[in-house]
Amino acid sequence: MTDALFAHLPQERFEAARDFLDQNGRGLDIALLRQWPAKEGAGEAVLAALAPFQNPDGGFGHGLEPDIQSPASSALATSIGLRFLARGEAQGDHPMVTAAIGWLDANLDRERGVWPIIGPDVDLAPHAPWWTWSEGLAASWNGFRFNPTAEILAWLYRYRAAVPGALLAAVEAGLRRTLVETALIEGAYDLKCALRLIEADGLPPDLADPLAALVSRSIADHDPADEHASPFDFAPTPASPFAGAVTDRTAAALAALIAAQSEDGGWTPFWDWSFVDAGAWETALRDWRGWLTREALETLLTWGRVEWDDRERS
């Protein structure tokens, strides 16, 4: 191994990244990063920045997932909304949480125990081509069995006291069928959602044990060159349950993440749908750059790869 594999993001590049985020990022990503290290009131700031993305029906939309700019609620955006509600330390009786659970209860496909990832209202605004609605969409997204359903189930366990029992039972029944029918989780985003579910408190052993075995097999089989997933999706922290499965890849991935920082301080997505709508992509690109810059800094901080001190910024 070379010394480059153990590189750290220099203090001045860390500051450049925070400046980039402050100047270009959404308020939500700025608030999320300010939880490093956690400051008093950080959770409240996250919830305040998240609130404009929630609809009166309880679901989330309005470009929370930047590749879908429709204002309409979707299961995809609502799964992300719940992820950030948890980051903001919202409790189960928080109005944003109860409203989101109400939307999920009203929109579950109860026969299969899944949430369709998007609906026809995605076409109310520009979106990436892979988010085009069709009646056959389930076939392209593995029946929605993991993405977004597994991640949503993780948040239902977190907020279990506020979740109708029949809702939880229907989703658990669907997951039991999925575990019997699935030999490997092949898609990167399906695997990410399954990993979030494994880390949830309250997953019953009859679901947790086979899911953990399935995820372990799937990580071992997953193509390490897949640009849609990094080792840090499988092991967000060194203490993550599957960190050992990617130990041989983390040093190189951290070095690559540091090297990928742009001159302006931010990180940039590898995808592009400007050929669909250049103006809409410009908006999405700005939002993604803020999101990815925040995530890059969170990863580097978590893995101890930033040269910085904890002084308040002037």
Image (tube, rainbow, N blue to C red):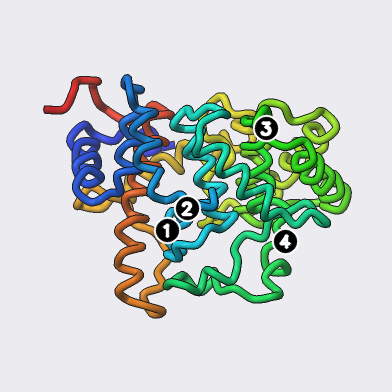
Q: Secondary structure at mark 1?
A: loop
How far is the residue under mark 4 from the one under mark 1?
Answer: 25 Å
Look at the image and tell me whether residue 52 can be seen: yes
Residue 154 % position (x, y):
65, 37
Q: Residue at x 68, y 45 (%)?
A: 150
Which numbered tag is attached to residue 157?
3
The reply to whether discs 2 and 1 touch (Cβ–Cβ < 8 Å) is yes
Q: Which residue is mark 1?
A: 62
Q: Is residue 255 left or right of residue 224?
A: left
Q: What amino acid is found at the position of numbered circle 4 in the picture? A: Asn
Nearer to me, 210 or 132: 132
Q: SS at mark 3?
A: helix
| Crowding at mark 4 (Cα within 10 Å: few <14, some 14-19, many 20+) | some
Q: Looking at the rendering, in which quadrant would you find the N terminus?
A: top left
| Observer-nearest of 27 and 276 | 27
The amino acid type of the residue labelled 2 equals Asn
**Numbered disc in front, either 2 or 1:** 2
In the picture of the structure, the residue carrying the numbered disc 4 is 142
Query: Gap in Å between the C-alphas at discs 1 and 3?
Result: 26 Å
Binning the other alpha carbons within 10 Å of mark 2 as few (below 14), some (14 to 19) or many (20 upward) gives some
Looking at the image, tell me whether mark 3 or mark 4 is earlier in sequence order.
Answer: 4
Sequence-first disc among 4 and 1: 1
Rendering coords of residue 273 (x, y %): 41, 72
Tell me the SS state at disc 2: loop
The span from disc 3 to disc 2 (Cα, nearest Å) is 23 Å
Residue with the mark numbered 2: 55
Tell me, for residue 73, which label it has, or none: none
Is 149 positioned to the left or the right of 68 in the image? right
Residue drawn 71% across the image and 66% down it: 138
Question: Of circles 4 and 1, which is in front?
Answer: 1
